[in-house]
Amino acid sequence: MTEVQGNNTQHDRSADQDAELRALNDQMKRRIEERRQLAEEGINPYPYGFDVTAYSKKIIERHQDGTPETVSVAGRIMTIRKMGKASFFHIQDTEGKIQVYIRRDDVGPDAYKIFKLLDIGDIVGIKGYTFRTKTGEISIHAEEFQLLSKSLRPIPVAKEKEVDGQKITYDAFSDKETRYRQRYVDLIVNPDVKQTFIKRSSIISFIRGFFIEKGYLEVETPILQPVYGGAAAKPFITHHNALNMELYLRIANELYLKRLIVGGFDGVFEFAKDFRNEGIDRFHNPEFTQVELYVAYKDYYWMMELVEELVYRTGKAVNESSSTLFLGHDISLKPPYRRLTIVDAIREYCAVDIRKKSETELRNMAKDLGLSLDPKISSGKIIDEIFGEFVEPKLIQPTFIIDYPTEMSPLAKDHRSEKGVVERFELIVGGKELCNSFSELNDPVIQRERLEAQAKLRLRGDDEAMVVDEDFLRALEYGMPPCAGLGIGVDRLVMLLTGQESIRDVIFFPHMKTE
């Protein structure tokens, strides 16, 4: 019985899809025919431009006093009520929606005939004056209109009906995968999505201004690199034909920015597209944005205070609030943030002590906690797995996790007072890492030892271990001043400040499997 029901469901689903496809084809055929008719009338369905002087939101704001205003607007038709000699439709522009009233006697019979060939989704330009309808809606009385782009594919339009006094929306463009694949449609029919990306732009602009205000220089470093480094990650590999050499898409811009500190800049930052050949989930996309900052003569204690100021001020600037709602949690961004060593954090949340434990002991601890580990990974990775599984998700309010074991941080400086650990912090907010920082290692002898130890881990099978970068080591040998470095995951910060639960909701075009 179960199998029969499953087959019937599959058959019904296929029948529904076939019906939808036939309806789509019929609509597209009709629109293509309308395009042909417009061409026969001598109308170019795709003219070269239109003079826009006003936008919907500001028009509505200005008309509150009832003073008529002559405007020239353009936008996409989102609703349309075609009647005899007069019709109403709504257009959507970059700011919102506004109603348009069009009458044959005003625009002329020839123009009105063209209007009758328009559909939801078509883009039009309107010249006219503002007024308020009998129902109180601020609208534009069209005196001229022009078709700017004929839409051949119908856009999905959500419908509303009233049930027991409540508006119910149905047929909405809400399927997540389709929305990510067709972001252009998502932005048309779900205009609230635009606000997330407008806020993303504001966040990036604020951070840039914050760093410039502090006197740091924005720079650019290579995306294609002959040696990748600066993080523990697997790279994407490409080939340069003219030079006949392998190149890597950068996984981080750290090592190049440190070269600039060697060269004499005291503070540099870069907004970077980085690429890591890793899995995809709601916190990871193989192409992502981060901003890295390096400041000479500073350490990780100083950087913690800078991060507190930056996160707090960014939240205040874009949300006008010292808190944010994320994953159902009300998160306070107000400094100071809690500071906790990674050893103490694991002891607090897992009731085990990882201090001075051998790799075998750590592996047995992880097994007792219920973790299944790759036998190739080393002590640092085991600690990282324990922390990531049992501690990180529980750190909701901003928390600095500090003082990591040396093996986990080959580019960080040894702790000034405790052996076996380095001066490093990660800021965890909402259960996920938001940024990473070191007192940067500037001793070229120790740095070489660290990178060579990483090379041995690669031989063990750790394909995320770092490689030896001889040019970077040569740069350090010329002398790099004491330095604090920082990397902030921009996508995750945007998620936090916009309340989005997936990285795909803050990236215009996230990576997807091929359809």
Image (tube, rainbow, N blue to C red):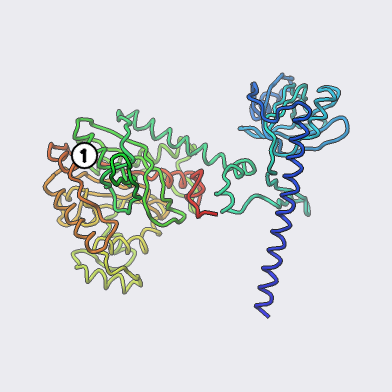
Q: Nearer the viewer, residue 74 or 385?
A: 74
Residue that lies at the very extreme toward the right in this rendered image: 84
The percent coordinates of residue 287 (x first, y second) are 41, 47
| Pick the front one: 338 or 390 | 390
Q: Quadrant of residue 150?
A: top right
Q: Quadrant of the N terminus?
A: bottom right
Q: Residues within 10 Å of mark 1 (few under 14, many from 20)?
A: many
- Is 60 placed left or right of 474 in the picture? right
Vertical order, 195 against 57 (above or below): below
Report whether 1 appears left or right of 479: right
The kind of secondary structure element at disc 1 is strand
The C terminus appears in which quarter of the rendering? bottom right
409 shown above or below 196: below
Q: Which residue is mark 1?
A: 483
Q: Residue at x 13, y 44 (%)?
A: 443
- Residue 206 in percent (x, y) is at 42, 33
What amino acid does circle 1 point to?
Cys
Where residue 55 appears, as percent x and y from the top left, is 64, 27
Q: Position of residue 245 (x, y in %)?
A: 28, 45
Task: Using the rendered view, name the quadrant where residue 129 is placed.
Answer: top right
The quadrant in which residue 2 appears is: bottom right
Image position of 324 (left or right of 266): right
What residue do we see at 26% from left, 39% from top? 256
Q: Is residue 187 left or right of residue 483?
A: right
Q: How many marks?
A: 1
**Residue at figure coordinates x 83%, y 22% from the top left:** 108
Specify the farthest residue to the bottom.
Answer: 1
